Amino acid sequence: MITGHTGFKGSWLAFWLSRLGADVTGFSLAPPTNPNLFDALRLQNHVHHIEGDVRDLVGVASAWAECSPEIVFHLAAQSLVRESYSDPLTTIATNIVGTANLLDIARTSREPVGMVLVTSDKCYENRETTVGYRETDCMGGHDVYSMSKGAAELLISSYRRSFFPAGSDEGKRVAIASARAGNVIGGGDWAADRIVPDCIRSLQSDAPIEVRHPNAVRPWQHVLEPLSGYLALGALLLSPGSADATKASEAWNFGPGEQNSSTVRELVERIVAGWGSGQWIDKSSASHPHEATMLRLSIEKAEKLLDWHPRWDFETTVSRTIDWYRAFYSGDDMSAWCSRQIDEYCEETS
């Protein structure tokens, strides 16, 4: 079961799982943009699609009962920082209550299940330091979005310790990991107020790209990077109570290597160069809502304990992203393109 399977990351994950032969049920709102990756991949032909809202406990429970999942990937979220300023209550309800609904269904269910609950690299109390945040660092959040992700992490931890402690009968029935990913880019994202979709829309319309925070540093990674981490966790969690599941039932960072932590300016200039045309303008303003200027993740834990390593460097990440959008606007078969990029990613040595 995937929540949020109509979104950018969720669509990639649903498509990848379906290619692996999984029986996938998706529970989500309708695709959030037009165009969108869910339709571009014709995912309604590959997954069992249930339209619903994770804030609706009855609806989520009904979908859960219908598919009786072995593994749950929870990606449904209000995922935009700026949106959390204009609609904080929806952000709180979706990101915190939606996560609580899934946890409580697992608590009251009798069937064994593994859960990969996806939050964000922004869950940490950001000290604007150049040192990458570790899984043991404090949760926090200046803006409501970041706070909601930190709160979701605290919620996950409290449910795990209260209801599914390691070694207990319930701990052997339910295994829960949380995953914190860096700034994800790749083909198929058309969300508002995200830098890559903003770039593509401007380049397509031959308009200058407006950049709000050109000097902000982010851990850029291709969407397939964290998804491979989620799949690695899911594989370990498939047997709750096993040593593998116990090892995986913690919080995990999935981010790029240090060389991929670049400024927004560097990303935009690389996109323009790869596109072959275009320009950007600095729209920095003190009136913009607060956004962190420095954010890095430590991935040492995932590298050592999961043997997970990022595979694509910054240049490859950007070029694969540009290639995807060019193919889309040329009318190519995007299922074939996504299959090809997944295959290329899996063939890379880390």
Image (cartoon, rainbow, N blue to C red):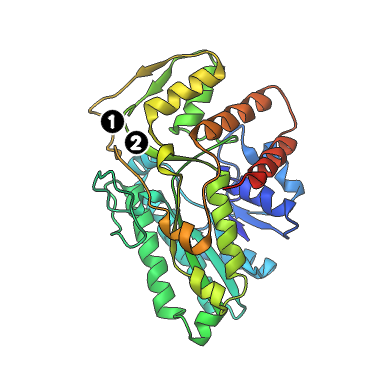
Q: Is residue 48 visible?
A: no
Coordinates of residue 286 in the picture (x, y in percent): 22, 28
Q: Which residue is mark 2?
A: 217
Whole-angstrom CA distance, mark 1 to mark 2, is: 17 Å
Coordinates of residue 19 in the picture (x, y in percent): 74, 51
Up/down of 192 relative to 16, above or below: above
Identify the amino acid type marked 2: Val
Coordinates of residue 235 in the picture (x, y in percent): 62, 65
Q: Is residue 70 visible?
A: yes
Up/down of 336 relative to 227, above or below: above
Coordinates of residue 287 in the picture (x, y in percent): 24, 28
Question: What residue is shown at x 44% (from left), y 30% (from top)?
Answer: 195
Q: Which residue is mark 1?
A: 288
Does label 1 or label 2 sit earlier along the sequence? 2
Q: Nearer the viewer, residue 244 or 128?
A: 244
Up/down of 218 relative to 113, above or below: above
Which image quarter holds the N terminus? bottom right
Q: Secondary structure at mark 2?
A: strand
Crowd around label 1: few <14 · some 14–19 · many ≥20 (10 Å): few
Q: Nearer the viewer, residue 215 or 130?
A: 130
Identify the amino acid type marked 1: His
Q: Nearer the viewer, residue 251 or 27?
A: 251
Question: What residue is shown at x 71% (from left), y 45% (from top)?
Answer: 43
Crowd around label 2: few <14 · some 14–19 · many ≥20 (10 Å): many
Labels 1, 2: front one: 2
Say which mark, if any, is on residue 31.
Answer: none
Question: What residue is shown at x 55% (from left), y 33% (from top)?
Answer: 316
Q: Secondary structure at mark 1?
A: loop
